[in-house]
Image (cartoon, rainbow, N blue to C red):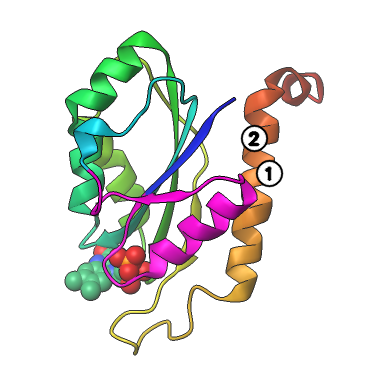
Amino acid sequence: MKNLVLYASRKGNTKEIAETIATELHSEAIDLKKVDIERINLGDVDNIFLGSGIYAGFLNGKVKKFLKSDNLKEAAGKSEKNIIFFVTWAGNPGSVEHAIEKSYDYMPEEGINIYTDHFRAYGAVFGMFKKGHPTAEEKQQASEWVREVLEKIEHPEEEMSQG
Ligand SMILES: Cc1cc2nc3c(=O)[nH]c(=O)nc-3n(C[C@H](O)[C@H](O)[C@H](O)COP(=O)(O)O)c2cc1C
């Protein structure tokens, strides 16, 4: 299975987690701010790890732009894509759920599977709140989570047989 890590990050918090995940996947983390979203090669990609900070209960605008892109729509029309979210946030209750749920409104209707689970770590805000996050421990958790996700995606039958 081919994995891709995409992220958008204003202050670098989500970038840190994206790079951790990419290292775990032996791939690179692509910054959505630095590429032409319509030209990202999605053709043979199965799993898209998609990272964002949370802003007033929404995902980063670049992530929204990617989810709305013709590129994703066309690629998902040809072969199914799993989207697996990871976010950084400051702990505002319900805001991550809200952001992810709202993203369903603008992603392609066909060919997309949203992975049921997501990863979240805290991210510092203006160097004041949640200072020092994401921590080394949170990055370690991100690596472990990636391994679990791949295991579940690649061997769903084992999940079921365990009951
Ligand atoms: C203007 C603004 C709005 C924010 N809104 C939320 C929010 O709704 N919920 C939350 O938990 N954190 C919120 N945060 C905190 C960010 O999600 C957090 O700092 C995150 O790590 C930023 O990621 P980034 O640096 O990768 O963009 C907000 C931060 C800012 C500056």
Q: Is residue 9 above or below residue 132?
A: above
Callouts 2 and 1 close, C-beta under 8 Å: yes
Q: Element type at marker 2?
A: helix
Range of residues picked out in magenta? 7-35
Q: Element type at marker 1?
A: helix
Q: Outermost residue, bottom direction?
A: 128
Q: Residue 56 appears in which quarter of the rendering?
A: bottom left
Work out which quarter of the rendered image holds the N terminus and state it.
top right
- Residue drawn 30% across and 60% down? 54
Q: Amino acid at mark 2?
A: Leu
Percent coordinates x, y for residue 121 in the rendering: 49, 64
Q: Which mark is residue 150?
A: 2
Q: Residue 163 appears in which quarter of the rendering?
A: top right
Percent coordinates x, y for residue 34 in the rendering: 25, 53
- Residue drawn 28% across and 49% down? 32
Count of number-bearing discs: 2
Q: Judge whether residue 18 is colored magenta.
A: yes
**Residue 109 vs residue 38, the one in the foreground:** 38
Answer whether residue 127 is visible to the viewer in this image.
Answer: yes
Q: Quadrant of ligand 1?
A: bottom left
Percent coordinates x, y for residue 116 in the rendering: 50, 35
Q: Is residue 65 above or below residue 77?
A: below
Q: Is residue 162 left or right of residue 142?
A: right
Q: Which mark is residue 162?
A: none
Answer whether residue 89 is visible to the viewer in this image.
Answer: no
Q: Residue 73 appears in which quarter of the rendering?
A: top left
Q: Amino acid at mark 1?
A: Arg
**Residue 99 vs residue 77, the one in the foreground:** 77
- Residue drawn 32% across and 79% down? 125
- Residue drawn 68% across and 42% down? 148
Local crowd at mark 1 within 10 Å, few (<14), some, or many (≥20)?
Answer: few
Can you identify the residue that label 1 sits on?
A: 147
